[in-house]
């Protein structure tokens, strides 16, 4: 990756985190002395190739303005009803000065490794195509409802992580098309797959967990402590 690139990061942070059972969005839970969202934005700000960070936040969110984001190049935009709506709002906000590439990262993944982000960016830029951080499925996978129907071969199964990185214009068009058609879009890669666009699988650390439940939060607190000890 020899030439400078134009790359923006998008963080959808309009969710309420209902599975946490909280009276506020989960991204404002504390890990140590910082909120989850502050940890996440701090990680992204340490990636040299990211030029700006766009955070999509609910208009009813009364917490974001109290975060300590000093010296971070962060811009707030209105979030949407679903994740894809929030990402699309953020992409549209960049139309006047669009970047070549956009990196989308979950607000609730503060443990992402900066080296993994750099590797994702290098892999995608060098190949000229988008990709996602992912890790191979290690557990035995069963299909069924209340009873196991059969075991799913895991040879080609990956767990999708974030960040996910794609050319800006292609991702914008793919998301717009998918939402107009009412398609189910669970991440940016699913919109790109639907548009028959390539999605590289770039191996990332399995401790890049998404904080969704109280158990996840407890584990993230432990893992963050270990990360900070190793710095």
Image (cartoon, rainbow, N blue to C red):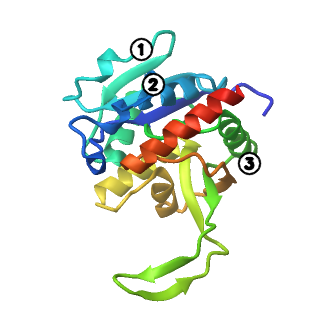
Question: Which element carries disc 1, helix, strand or loop?
Answer: loop
Mark 2–mark 1 CB contact (< 8 Å)? yes
Left or right: 188 in relation to 132: left
Picture quadrant of residue 75: top left
First in sequence: mark 2 or mark 3? 2
First in sequence: mark 2 or mark 1? 2
At 70% across and 35% down in the image, what residue appears? 118
Q: Nearer the viewer, mark 1 or mark 3?
A: 1
Q: Which one is in front, 213 or 137?
A: 213
Q: Which one is in front, 177 or 111?
A: 111
At 44% across and 23% down in the image, what residue appears? 34
Mark 2–mark 3 CB contact (< 8 Å)? no
The answer for how far apart the CA atoms under marks 1 and 3 are is 37 Å
> How many residues crowd around disc 3 within 10 Å: few (fewer than 14), some, or many (20 or more)?
few
The quarter of the image holding the N terminus is: top right
* Residue 100 in view: no
Residue 109's mark?
none
The answer for how far apart the CA atoms under marks 2 and 3 are is 32 Å
The answer for how far apart the CA atoms under marks 2 and 1 are is 7 Å
> How many residues crowd around disc 2 within 10 Å: few (fewer than 14), some, or many (20 or more)?
many
* Residue 107 in view: yes
Q: Which one is in front, 5 or 33?
A: 33
Residue identifier under label 2:
38
Residue identifier under label 3:
127
Expressed as whole percent of the image width and height from the top left, the position of residue 62 reads 22, 23
Left or right: 17 in relation to 50: left
Residue identifier under label 1:
68
Q: Nearer the viewer, mark 2 or mark 3?
A: 2
């Amino acid at each position: 990756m020899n030439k400078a690139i134009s790359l923006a990061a998008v963080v959808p942070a309009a969710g309420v985190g209902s599975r946490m059972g909280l009276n506020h969005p989960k991204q404002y839970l504390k890990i140590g002395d910082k909120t989850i969202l502050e940890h996440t934005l701090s990680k992204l700000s340490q990636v040299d190739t990211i030029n700006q960070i766009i955070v999509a936040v609910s208009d009813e969110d009364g917490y974001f303005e109290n975060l300590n984001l000093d010296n971070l190049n962060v811009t707030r935009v209105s979030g949407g009803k679903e994740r894809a709506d929030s990402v699309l709002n953020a992409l549209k906000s960049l139309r006047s000065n669009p970047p070549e590439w956009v990196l989308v990262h979950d607000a609730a993944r503060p443990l992402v490794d900066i080296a993994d982000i750099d590797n994702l960016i290098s892999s995608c830029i060098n190949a000229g195509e988008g990709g996602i951080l992912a890790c191979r499925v290690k557990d035995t996978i069963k299909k069924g409802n209340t009873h196991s129907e059969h075991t799913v071969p895991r040879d080609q199964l990956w767990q999708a992580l974030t960040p996910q990185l794609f050319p800006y214009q292609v991702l914008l068009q793919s998301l717009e098309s998918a939402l107009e058609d009412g398609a189910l879009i669970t991440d940016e890669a699913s919109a790109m797959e639907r548009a028959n666009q390539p999605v590289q699988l770039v191996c990332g650390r399995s401790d890049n967990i998404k904080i969704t439940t109280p158990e996840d939060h407890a584990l993230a607190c432990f893992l963050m402590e270990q990360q900070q000890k190793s710095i």
